[in-house]
Image (cartoon, rainbow, N blue to C red):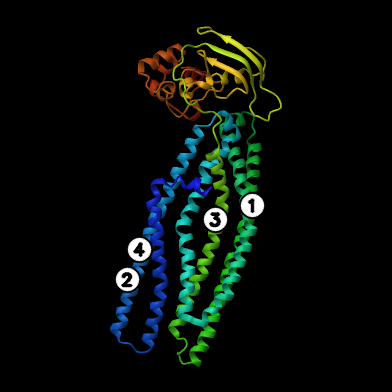
Amino acid sequence: MIKKLAGSIREFKLPTIITILFMVGEVVIECLIPFITANLVNRIKAGDDIKNVIATGVILVIMAILSLTCGGVAGYTSAKASAGFARNLRHDIFSRIQTYSFTNIDKFSTASLVTRLTTDISNTQMAYMMVIRTAVRSPLMFIFAIIMAFIMGGSLAMTFVVVVPVLVFGLLMISRHAMPAFRRVFKKYDKLNESIEENVRAMRVVKGFSREDHEKEKFNRAADDICRDFTKAERIVAFNTPIMQFCMYFNMVFVLIVGSKLTIEHMGQVIDIGQISAMLTYGMQILMSLMMVSMIYVMLTMSSESMKRICQVLDEVPSLHNPENPVTSVADGSVSFTDVDFKYFEKAERNALDNISIDIKSGMTVGIIGGTGVGKSSLVQLIPRLYDVSAGSIKVGGVDVRDYDIETLRSSVAMVLQKNLLFSGTIKENLRWGNENATDEEIIEACKLAQAHDFIETFPEGYDTYIEQGGTNVSGGQKQRLCIA
């Protein structure tokens, strides 16, 4: 899964590497600052010369500026890398969907695909940013801070042998109980988006039947379901803070009591005030890094569900593909069905079409008549190979449709679907879906043949009239004639 997703990083590998390098630099500097500060405190206590104190202070200021710079650069490059990764991933998914046959699309609902292109990619983007920033910074900070704590505090650093396991155990238990709730949430997003999509698309029907209250109830059920799961998960995750505070204050009290006792008893020979201050700082760094590691774990576990859903789309193999040596021209408009069987799913119990044989010569006008559900639309959709036959063969221009280049075949078949669909854009832009290079004269001629020219001329902007999404600003009949054109 990671290898599949990593393929979308592409040109953003350099910002990713730069982020990691600057994160390492920031961690090293932050771990050195308490060390130098501790030595400075001890030298001030010993009555060191003010010039040396000022010089050390200047070094600390420079290191702080360098740490800030490293963090700023890493923040910029990580944002660039993660946003670019998300853009590429979104492009790859959308491009993949364009290669799907209707069979592939039938496996995913429209709402589910929208969720994967939006919410799931946003989660994956956030996870990627955390991986190249926090997932690099926190483990390194933990390791370096532990090393520096033992260098500075010696036996006093044994407090972490007690505190760290307690914190790790607590964070793991929290994550273990919170994860199932987070996993359930992402599956329920599809239902929520489906409710929104259906309601918006069918707004006229909803209002026509005065079913607004029913739709509100349906939406509220889906939203409340997600809210309950998120509340449960967040309530569990909220225990991070008290566990963290307990460990932090325990460490602070232990270091102050034991450290002060050792300082007084041994007159600063074993440990001094500077080391105690450094131990407090390193303790905070160690515990905060563990806290961030737990948050990374939670985020990555949440995002893993999104990543799996994204990979399902990327891994889906289009059921239709071009042959090795495709035919790139259609000789004529003849259509021949020979013993054709068809079913929408392999495991379907019955066929949508059974043993169909038809021979239509080029130039003929043929009407296919039958009752609802007998397979008229299914039969027509097999001609441009929107689906493949389950058995038998279909020939167009004397050549099996499976031997054609798919684009060549489909560009030779003009379809006016039962459900008229217009895209947001001008009338001209919609008409050029049939031929992107069509001249204005060809557009007008097509509209005259489709009986659309007259009503288009009544619009103030004529052929430059903007069509709203779904063609909501034209009548049903006008929409149908524009689709024919």
Q: Residue at x 53, y 59 (%)?
A: 296
User: Are there few (<14), some (14-19), or many (20+) residues within 10 Å of tag 1?
Assistant: some
The residue at the far left in this view is 51
Q: Amino acid at mark 1?
A: Asp
Sequence-wise first label, 4 or 2: 2
Q: Which mark is residue 229?
A: 1
- Disc 2 residue type? Ile
Q: Nearer the viewer, residue 320 or 310?
A: 320
What mark, if any, has residue 69 been given in the picture?
4
Q: Earlier in the sequence, mark 4 or mark 1?
A: 4
Q: Could you tell me residue 220's position as x and y percent?
A: 63, 44
Left or right placement of residue 424 versus residue 165 in this view: left
Mark toward the start of the polypeptide (2 vs 3): 2
Looking at the picture, which amino acid does disc 4 mark? Answer: Thr
Amino acid on which disc 3 is placed: Met
Inter-mark Cα distance, 3 to 1: 16 Å
Q: Marks 4 and 1, Cα distance to the nearest angstrom?
A: 40 Å
Q: Is residue 70 left or right of residue 101?
A: left
Spatial CA span between label 2 and label 1? 48 Å
Q: Position of residue 480 (x, y in %)?
A: 51, 19
The span from disc 3 to disc 4 (Cα, nearest Å) is 27 Å
Label 3 belongs to which residue? 299
